[in-house]
Image (cartoon, rainbow, N blue to C red):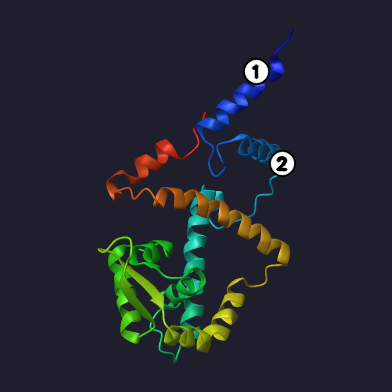
Amino acid sequence: MKYDLIKELIQLAETFESNPGNYPSNINGFKQWVHDQVKEADQPIHEPVWEGKEKGRTPESVINTLIVHMNRYAKTYSKSAIHDSAFSTQEEFIYLVNLKAFGAMSKMELIKKNIQDKPAGMQIINRLIQQGWVEQKDSETDKRSKIIGITPNGLDALAQQMDKIRHATNIVTGDLSYAEKMELIRLLNKLDHFHHAIYSQNYSPAELLEKVTKEYLPVKN
């Protein structure tokens, strides 16, 4: 009796378990992983043209540069949206949006949700407190921690700028079609899930690159 199929399945399972990536480490995650591997293999790759390609510039370099550029473009539109308002920075607005959407939370939860370091996050929270847009109280579960919640004044401040912020958000997506937006969301979500798992580990700068290389990136044969 031949067991070639079983052997191939075992090899696939070993490959998956060694690096599941963003997939759940269970049978459903394995099935989705196999499906995506086959789908990706069947799809022809159409390489776009990018600056420096003929000189050996890598796709990774282009992706990093474009992400940085998009962040700067988005900040430019956000600055315009909060011009002549009481908001000083885009981050103040985003902090309030998160508190409105997710409810009260600890200072560190709010800072981490916005992927910022503690000193910068605390400065933003202190400005929001001074504006009367958020209030803090002792945590019921940890007296050393402060819980931050949005105030009625904070909700009013959001409401006054929301139309302009939505307009700026629409501009950032440019002339992408609906299908292109959906594909971009899928890819950005995949990247976000990958990096958020690493970010949550709080690796020190000295060990970050080595840890990610060994534990998160696929092994190249």
Camera sees residue 14: yes
Q: SS class of the residue under badge 1? A: helix
Q: Position of residue 135 (x, y in %)?
A: 35, 79
- Left or right: 205, with 47 as reference point: left
The correct choice, above or below, for 115 with respect to 204 in the image is below
Residue 210 shows which numbered tag? Answer: none
Disc 1: which residue: 7
Camera sees residue 82: no
Which residue is depicted at the point 27% across and 67% down?
119
| Residue reaching furthest to the top | 1
Point out the image quarter for the N terminus.
top right
User: Of 164 and 176, which appears nearest the observer?
Assistant: 164
The correct choice, above or below, for 35 with respect to 191 in the image is above
Crowding near the residue tagged with mark 1, few <14, some 14–19, many ≥20 C-alpha atoms within 10 Å = few
Q: In which quarter of the image is residue 3?
A: top right
How far, Cα to Cα, is label 1 from label 2?
A: 22 Å
Number of marks present in the image shown: 2
The correct choice, above or below, for 213 with respect to 114 in the image is above
Residue type for callout 1 = Lys
Which residue is depicted at the point 31% across and 73% down?
137
Marks 1,2: beta carbons within 8 A: no
Residue type for callout 2 = Lys
Q: SS class of the residue under badge 2? A: helix
Which residue is depicted at the point 67% across and 72% down?
175
Q: Where is residue 87 in the image (x, y as percent from the top left)?
A: 41, 85
Disc 2: which residue: 39
Q: Earlier in the sequence, mark 1 or mark 2?
A: 1
| Residue reaching furthest to the front | 140
Q: Position of residue 177 (x, y in %)?
A: 71, 67
User: Of 189 and 176, which appears nearest the observer?
Assistant: 189
Which residue is depicted at the point 59% across and 27% down?
13
Crowding near the residue tagged with mark 2, few <14, some 14–19, many ≥20 C-alpha atoms within 10 Å = few
